[in-house]
Image (spheres, rainbow, N blue to C red):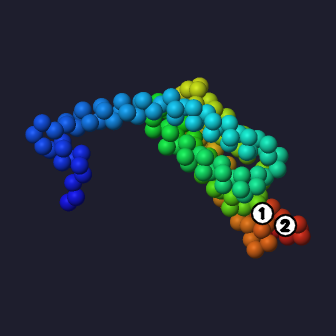
Amino acid sequence: MVKTALETRCRMPGGKRIAAALGDASKNLESLAPESLRLIDSGLKEISALVDAAEQARPGDDDLVRVRALADELVGYCATVDLPGLDTAFIRLCQLTEAVLRTTYWKSDTFAPTLLVLKMARHRALTPGELEKLFKGIDQCTEKYLSSRPAGPSGVGQPAHMPSVHGRVH
């Protein structure tokens, strides 16, 4: 078994107790909170700009990849702030963005509810129960995209129940 330096130090006489080590780690994370909030707010603005401008038309793949990368990065900053549900909202945004990337199917305002949930979670405007209900709605939207046909060799994807441009149902 490989021992870490912290474990070795904790096991030595006079070493740091686990409770003290956890307390120190928590204080260190708390000290990062102001900068993390600034980065979260900045990231939310960038995400909004990328998808708000394109709500009527499907965002380009490059913009979607950027949204997914930003959301993934912002999940990490949530560890340093006490904003229940914000990390989960960013994870849901990653999942929805990935689902949208898998097809060219598009429904206008796809990202609007998720952005609203993110902004409300950021400002503690929702209870945990309200967040859970809204997450279920986001999950349904994600499932809709996952159940649509992926982009084919021609780059065109359609929802499984939608007729193609040739009038045939796939």
Provide residue 21's location: percent of width, then percent of height. Answer: 26, 36
Which residue is disc 2 drawn over? Answer: 164
Q: Residue at x 66, y 55 (%)?
A: 65
Quadrant assignment for the C terminus? bottom right
Camera sees residue 146: yes
Q: Please, what is the three-letter code of the amino acid marked with disc 1? A: Gln
Q: Residue at x 45, y 38 (%)?
A: 79
Camera sees residue 148: no
Is residue 20 left or right of 60 when viewed as pictured? left
Q: Quadrant of residue 40?
A: top right
Q: Neighbour class for label 2 at 10 Å: few (<14), some, many (≥20)?
A: some
Compare residues 61 and 96 and report the one nearer the observer: 61
Which residue is disc 1 drawn over? Answer: 158
Q: Which residue ends up furthest to the left in the rendered image?
A: 13
Q: Please, what is the three-letter code of the amino acid marked with disc 2? A: Ser
**Is 27 drawn above or below residue 12 in the view shown?**
above
Quadrant assignment for the N terminus? bottom left
Provide residue 41's location: percent of width, then percent of height. Answer: 61, 33
Marks 2/1 in contact by CB < 8 Å: the verdict is yes
Compare residues 2 and 101 and report the one nearer the observer: 2
Is residue 57 left or right of 72 when viewed as pictured? right
- Earlier in the chain: of badge 2 and badge 1, it is 1
